[in-house]
Image (tube, rainbow, N blue to C red):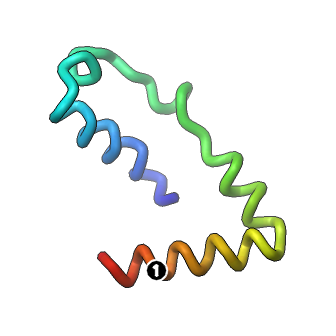
Amino acid sequence: MPPDAPAGVLRYVAVTNEEVRNAWIDLASTYMNQFVQEASRSESMGHFLAATVDALEAKA
């Protein structure tokens, strides 16, 4: 996941959710990319993630 993606998701949710919009959310303490990093080390999961990223980028 791109490093700026969590902040983008937070901005998106804040537009439609007043509670999130009015909250202070520290993404550095609530979000981590550990699962993706560990999954990408697995060969089969790495292929799956690469295919998923390719598909998402093709839609963008």
Measured as percent of width and height from the top left, residue 47 is found at 71, 79
Quadrant, the C terminus: bottom left
- Determine the residue positioned at 23% across, 31% down: 14
Measured as percent of width and height from the top left, residue 22 is found at 22, 16
Left/right placement of residue 36 relative to residue 23 reads right
- Determine the residue positioned at 34% across, 44% down: 9
Residue with the mark numbered 1: 55
Measured as percent of width and height from the top left, residue 28 is found at 51, 31
Figure quadrant of residue 29: top right
What amino acid does circle 1 point to? Ala
Which of the two residues, 15 or 33, is positioned nearer the viewer here?
A: 15
The image shows a total of numbered marks equal to: 1
Measured as percent of width and height from the top left, residue 26 is found at 44, 24
Q: Is residue 52 above or below residue 33?
A: below
**Residue extending furthest right?**
42
Which of the two residues, 47 or 27, is positioned nearer the viewer here?
A: 47
Left/right placement of residue 7 relative to residue 44 reads left
Question: For numbered disc 1, what is the local secondary structure?
Answer: helix
Left/right placement of residue 29 relative to residue 60 reads right
Q: Is residue 30 above or below residue 52?
A: above
